[in-house]
Image: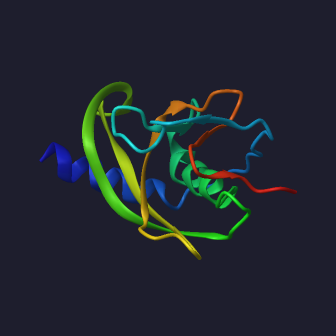
Amino acid sequence: MKKIFLLFGLGLLMSCGSSRQLEANEITNEELGYNPSHPILVGSNDLRYGPEYEQNYLNNLSGPNGEVISYTRLGSCCEFATPKGIMGGGMLDKYEIKYEGLEKPIILYLNMYEPAPKEIKVPSGLKLKEN
């Protein structure tokens, strides 16, 4: 029942919006995002905007040579305890990333519950779009 409520709650949040700019600092990390133990933190102190922040983050990524990426949300997984979540829990969102020339899609894990660091971190093999 808790999982059903959590998923329903996350669905309701998808309609909320806000604007937030990514900073242009790029820090790569070999495990960042590729492992559920090291998800990409994209949240804020206001959970309502978590899904939008995930999309904003992904919309600002490109392939290693500036390739345009596409992404598909595969669903939620990897339940964890957090006081910032609904009923004391949260789930990571799992995304499939593709771009032209990529042999096999990349799977990334994002955490919309924990605030993003001031310096945007980018998974190894990807980079921030150039403005």
Task: Pick whichever, 92 or 20, lies toward us.
Answer: 92
Left or right placement of residue 122 versus residue 24 in this view: left
Measured as percent of width and height from the top left, residue 17 is found at 63, 55
Left or right placement of residue 9 versus residue 128 in this view: left
Task: Pick whichever, 44 or 39, lies toward us.
Answer: 39
User: Colour mode?
Assistant: rainbow
Query: Residue 124: in sight, yes or no?
Result: yes
Q: Which residue of the protein is positioned furthest toward the top in this rendering?
A: 83
Measured as percent of width and height from the top left, residue 65 is found at 72, 61
Query: Residue 88: in sight, yes or no?
Result: no
**Residue at horizontal 59%, vertical 33%?**
44
**Residue at horizontal 60%, vertical 48%?**
53
Q: Which residue of the protein is positioned furthest toward the right in this rendering?
A: 131
89 over 63 or under it: above or below: above
Measured as percent of width and height from the top left, residue 106 is found at 44, 59
Measured as percent of width and height from the top left, residue 122 is found at 62, 42
Q: Quadrant location of residue 63? A: bottom right
Q: How many marks?
A: 0
Task: Pick whichever, 39 or 17, lies toward us.
Answer: 39
Q: Which residue of the protein is positioned furthest toward the bottom in this rendering?
A: 100
Left or right placement of residue 130 versus residue 60 in this view: right
Task: Pick whichever, 122 or 53, lies toward us.
Answer: 122
23 over 94 or under it: above or below: above
Query: What quarter of the picture does the C terminus occupy?
Result: bottom right
**Residue at horizontal 36%, vertical 44%?**
92
Q: Quadrant location of residue 99? A: bottom right
